[in-house]
Image (cartoon, grey):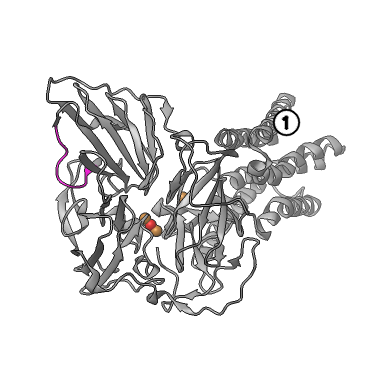
Amino acid sequence: MYMMFFGSSVLLLIGMAVLWSVFLFRGRRWLTLLNIFFLLAWLGLALVATWSIGWEFIRQIFGMLAPMVVSPFILLVTVRDRSVWGQLVKRYAVFVSWFAVYMITFQIPAFPDGWTYFECFGLPILVFILLYAWDKWFGRRFYRHWIVIGSVLMILGFIFISLLWNAKAMQDEGHAMQGNWGGGKVTSVKPSVDVTTLTGPDATAVTKQYDFTAAKKNMSVPDGSEKELWLFNGQLTGPAIRVTQGDVVEVTLTNKNIEDGITIHWHGYDVPNAEDGVPDISQKVVAVGESYTYRFTADTAGTFWYHSHNQSSEQVGHGLFGSFIVEPKKQVKEELEIVGFVAPKYVDSSGALLPANGKVPKNIKPGTNVRIRLGNAHNKPQKLILNGTTFQIAAIDGNLIHKPTDLKETYLQIPAGGRMDITFTMPNHAVCLFDAKDATGGWVFQSTGENTKASTEIPDNVFKPEKYGEKKATTLDASDGFDRLFTMVFDSKLAFFDGMVHHLWTINGELYPNTPMLMVNEGDLVKTTFVNRSYSHHPMHLHGHKMLVLTRNGAATTGSPWWTDTLNVKPGETYEVAFKADNPGIWMDHCHNLDHATNGMMMHLQYNNVYTPFSGHTHE
Ligand code: C2O
Ligand code: CU
């Protein structure tokens, strides 16, 4: 509904602007009538939208733009003098209607600042006064096309300047991060714990050791082309880490030739803060020729992954990632395991499925229990389909689903950065797993019995984690309420830099480093509300903690407890999640569409008594 409201608003506003422009030259009555019809349609649409998704979502677009768009109509009926005034109102109408188009497509963030208010409310008045003065003093001495050209140039200039202005906000240094205490007690404990002391066990405890060297390598990618990739140990996907619950893992990372330096982040794994791999918070980047050692206990079983966390969009995009799997202490049943990742953007722009360790089996014996551990290293959510068998989702982001039920004719949407474990029993015919964008690609598993074809039909139903499995009590007890409540509203604006117009992605109207910093005390129970008022998906990833999803679009979750570390928030969606602040540190909380993170959509969760000795805030 939100997207529909947004899309139709853009179309209706463009329609009005076009009508006003034509009206300027040939003031026909039907043009006015048609325009009034468009306006009424927009008002009606806003009404329906308010009723169905709530005023919160349309407040910005409608509340800010309606007065501007309605004003020329009001002037037209109230202003009586048809000669000078008539022309004046028409020109004013052309300006505000196009300006509204610009505002809705480029500019209006969820939390408008003073400047946006000026643009929507002050600027139309100013323009009216200027036009009036122009008419009074120059009205009869200037030709109309001069006026038109002049206005067009003025508007273009204005747009250009505000695009530059937006870009400048991204380069902000210093006056960063207002601490946001989420309504809870402000604790003025002096920062006293240095993140670098929050480490994993020492070297004597290590039971699984790995050496990773990051380097560039030319190789052919799934689409057949030859590319320069950036890889750990020359492998795509990176070397698989597979350990057993309880192991102490050590990874020594060496940077051979990745110029800007690298780190490793253990995505979804709640390691101690110093092992988290975030440049300028938990460590300095590992420069060319340098090494760095990570060490932590693998205390939770599940499907995870690791990736470089420096200039993540570029580095993960070029292949610096791999699977990280922790097997449970006691295996429940004999299983054939297949691990796969959706390729990141430079490796394969459409996101082909990459086998993460070894090959994907072609033939599977009927009756075999199969587990496919899937991850998504791409920036976009992936629509994946398993055809040919009923299946279950055994885990989301490494967290077991309580009593999963059989699914069929259901597609999965795996968030960027997210993981899902699919389990099924191999039937005596073919099963296939593919991406909706490419039904001819993906993986086909043949039964050893006979060769058949699996359907490549794309089902209509999406898997709904909020309703899947059975309810069960969790470790997170909110019966006494929450210590802190945060609301994060996602939106976007446009900016001009590097010779191009880019989207900037805002949280509560701000770009990193001015985004809110969530302040907590150790032990706090925290509730965060995500509201996505932009027109793109935002897979929100919190480091160091697991989030329990409480509600989706206002409705409480009814299935198995849904724990996640990367929650995809679609345009127009609202989620409430809860987590326990039980892992002291300074943690990133960001969108895992890594391009969005680069362009502003990052923030921090900070424990009040922790500080970092590393300065700067360029970390991604
Ligand atoms: Cu997978 Cu902060 O990232
Ligand atoms: Cu995003």
Tell me where residue 444 sits by quadrant.
top left
Q: Position of residue 501 (x, y in %)?
A: 46, 53
The image shows residue 168, relative to residue 331, as above or below, that is below
Residue 470 shows in the view: yes
* Residue wearing tag 1: 27
Residue 144 shows in the view: no
Of the four image quadrants, the one with ligand 1 is bottom left
x 25%, y 43%: residue: 340
Dot 1, crowdedness within 10 Å: few (<14), some or many (≥20)?
some
Q: Position of residue 178 (x, y in %)?
A: 59, 68
Q: Position of residue 232 (x, y in %)?
A: 20, 59
Assign the C terminus to one quadrant of the image: bottom left
Residue range (magenta): 354-362
x 66%, y 38%: residue: 54
Q: Secondary structure at mark 1?
A: loop
In the image: residue 105, left or right of residue 374: right
Look at the magenta stretch and give its main secondary structure: loop
Assign the N terminus to one quadrant of the image: top right
Work out whether residue 151 or residue 585 is closer to the camera in this orientation and state it: 585
In the image: residue 577, left or right of residue 323: right
In the image: residue 308, left or right of residue 460: left
Residue 564 is one of the magenta-drawn residues: no
